[in-house]
């Protein structure tokens, strides 16, 4: 499986500020995904980060709130903008190493608390 | 879009018993069904998966079955051990969304010694 790291592992932020989360993979991957896991809940896909093109957002998530970058095949960032306490969640990136296979592996997550 | 339902939400068993978690999906074009185990404070770990052209798959004490006609799939854990205690999530890849995953709501499994 791919080795995936995320920074920061956790953060406490003030309402109205923004936080950028980084996701690094140890090899080139075609697809990278960003998920949100609210406390005690399941995982919800925010967007698919495509290298060389705009991210594809799921229903209920918009680029102004969650801008995503994918500058190369090993790295992506997710920004949580103008945060409110409702954004307190774990944010996880994931990827599929092989574009012909479906297995997804997750990063360790970023635990965000918004005060 | 795809909707995945998962039952039960909690499951308590005695060590050595079997545990079964069930999921249903709505998109008949879905073709990939992984199961993840998430321990407290950890990332989800892929434990087994099945594709739509297979009815059953086993890996030691865990197995997954798929019924495409009924659009449901199940995780079976035999000879449960306390270290199996975790939250288990099923997921499905919608037919229209390559490699993206729609998750079930999760099952908290507690295995008592």
Image: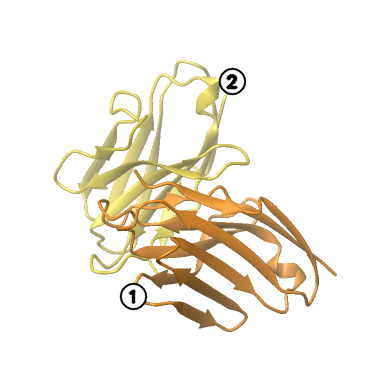
Residue drawn at 26 percent across, 60 percent down? A29
Asked which secondary structure carries label 1, the reply is loop
The relative height of residue B20 versus residue B1 in the rendered view (above or below) is: below
Q: Is residue A35 left or right of A9 when viewed as pictured?
A: left
Q: Give the vertical position of B36 relative to A44 (above or below).
A: below
Front residue of B59/A21: it is B59
Q: Nearer the viewer, residue B95 or B15?
A: B95
In the rendered view, tell whether residue A109 sits above or below residue A1: above
The outermost residue toward the front is B69
| Residue A26 image position (x, y, % from top left) | 34, 62
Specify the farthest residue to the right: B113
Instruction: Name the residue at 78% across, 77% down.
Output: B16
Q: Is residue A74 visible?
A: no
> Which residue has dot 1 on it?
B53
- The residue that label 2 is drawn on is A115
Task: Count numbered badges in the picture.
Answer: 2
Report the side of A72 relative to A17 (left or right).
Answer: left
Instruction: Provide residue A80's location: percent of width, then percent of height.
Output: 40, 29
Q: Which chain is yellow?
A: A
Q: Quadrant of residue A25?
A: bottom left
Crowding at dot 1, Cα within 10 Å, few <14 / some 14-19 / many 20+, comes out as: few
- Image chain in orange: B
* Chain label for disc 1: B
């Amino acid at each position: 499986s791919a080795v995936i790291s995320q920074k920061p592992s956790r953060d406490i932020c003030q309402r109205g500020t923004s936080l950028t989360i980084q996701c690094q993979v140890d090899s080139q991957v075609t697809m990278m995904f960003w998920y949100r896991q609210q406390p005690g809940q399941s995982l919800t896909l925010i967007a698919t980060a495509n290298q060389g093109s705009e991210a594809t957002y799921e229903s209920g998530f918009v680029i102004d709130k969650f801008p995503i970058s994918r500058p190369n095949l090993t790295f992506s960032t997710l920004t949580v903008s103008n945060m409110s306490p409702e954004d307190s969640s774990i944010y996880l990136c994931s990827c599929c190493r092989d574009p012909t296979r479906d297995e997804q592996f997750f990063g360790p997550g970023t635990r965000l608390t918004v005060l | 879009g795809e909707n995945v339902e998962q039952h039960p939400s909690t499951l308590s068993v005695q060590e050595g018993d079997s545990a079964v978690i069930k999921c249903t999906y709505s998109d008949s074009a879905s073709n990939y069904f992984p199961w993840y185990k998430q321990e407290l404070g950890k990332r989800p770990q892929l434990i087994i998966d099945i594709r739509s052209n297979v009815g059953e798959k086993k890996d030691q004490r865990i197995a997954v079955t798929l019924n495409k006609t009924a659009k449901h799939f199940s995780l079976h854990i035999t000879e449960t051990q306390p270290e199996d205690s975790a939250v288990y999530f099923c997921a499905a890849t919608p037919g229209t969304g390559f490699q993206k995953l729609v998750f079930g709501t999760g099952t908290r499994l507690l295995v008592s010694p």
